[in-house]
């Protein structure tokens, strides 16, 4: 079955700097990769996603890149702000919302003011 | 839309007692997922339904766990008897065929003492 590894487990950056979180997956059949942000005590919320026919996707300060050959994908946050502090989860699935996602173990991001 | 609604938000119970968690998906969503979140194991899929029919229950830890979806607007996850190692946050999520990403509920924090 699918296995998703996520690194680093914790990440501290200064406000205004960039943050990068990386994930690798094992199943070449996976073709949908969502990213979720979870603030303390709250629900995971979808922040960006990418399908396998696209190499990069941007939404304001966040972007996701995908390398299908190497089976890895990354989340990039630029100009970080204190409100970006949260736990970020990557996931892989054989398709979008109607399939079970296999989640990474999460990255706790701290943005230092 | 009220989103995915879970109840109760918090549950504290004694070992051996029956626990029932409830979920109301977003109206019109035809997929429903139950996840469990712990520090040690992250987000684990327990079971998911399509059009009220269980599709994959391979993540249900053991026979003490059962889930039902009697209609399109209601699902339950039951643990009987409960054990301290069941303590976790249980999330319900729903999605729409052809849609992207899950919408998670606020979760139920279960503590078994």
Image: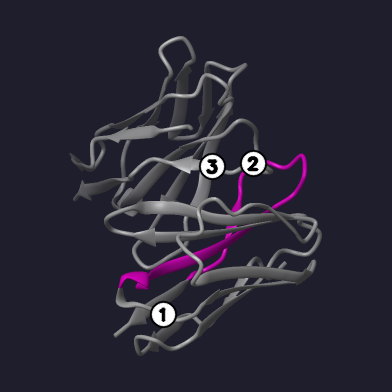
Asked if B38 appears above or below A94 in the picture, the reply is below
Query: Mark 3 near mark 1, Cβ–Cβ under 8 Å?
Result: no
Q: Name the residue under label 2.
A: A99
Q: Position of residue A34 (x, y in %)?
A: 52, 37
Instruction: Let me know if residue A77 appears in the view.
Output: no
Of all chains, the one bearing label 2 is A
Asked if B60 appears above or below A17 in the picture, the reply is below
Q: Mark 3 points at which residue?
A: A101
Compute the Cα span from label 3 to label 1.
26 Å
Structural crowding at the residue carrying mark 1, measured as other residues with C-alpha within 10 Å and reported as few (<14), some (14–19) or many (≥20): many
Query: Mark 2 near mark 3, Cβ–Cβ under 8 Å?
Result: yes
Mark 3 or 1: in front is 1
The magenta segment is B85-107
Compute the Cα span from label 2 to label 1.
29 Å
Q: Where is residue B86 in the image (x, y as percent from the top left)?
A: 37, 71
Q: Where is residue B8 in the image (x, y as percent from the top left)?
A: 52, 83
Q: Which mark, residue B82? A: 1
For the residue pair A109 and B83, the one nearer the viewer reads as B83
């Amino acid at each position: 079955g699918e296995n998703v590894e996520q690194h680093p487990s914790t990440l501290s950056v200064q406000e205004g700097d960039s943050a990068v979180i990386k994930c690798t997956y094992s199943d070449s059949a996976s073709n949908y990769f969502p990213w979720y942000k979870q603030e303390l005590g709250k629900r995971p919320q979808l922040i960006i996603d990418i399908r396998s026919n696209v190499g990069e996707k941007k939404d304001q300060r966040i972007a996701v890149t995908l390398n299908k050959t190497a089976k890895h994908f990354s989340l990039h946050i630029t100009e970080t702000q204190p409100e970006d502090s949260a736990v970020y989860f990557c996931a892989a699935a054989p398709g979008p919302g109607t399939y079970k996602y296999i989640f990474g173990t999460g990255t706790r991001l701290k943005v230092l003011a | 839309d009220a989103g995915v609604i879970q109840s109760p938000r918090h549950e504290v119970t004694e070992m051996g007692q029956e626990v029932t968690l409830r979920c109301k998906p977003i109206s019109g969503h035809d997929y429903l997922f139950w996840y469990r979140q712990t520090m040690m194991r992250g987000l684990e899929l327990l079971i998911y339904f399509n059009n009220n029919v269980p599709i994959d229950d391979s993540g249900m830890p053991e026979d003490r766990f059962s889930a039902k979806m009697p209609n399109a607007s209601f699902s339950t996850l039951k643990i009987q008897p409960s054990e301290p190692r069941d303590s976790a946050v249980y999330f319900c999520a729903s999605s729409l065929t052809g849609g992207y990403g899950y919408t998670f509920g606020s979760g139920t924090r279960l503590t078994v003492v």
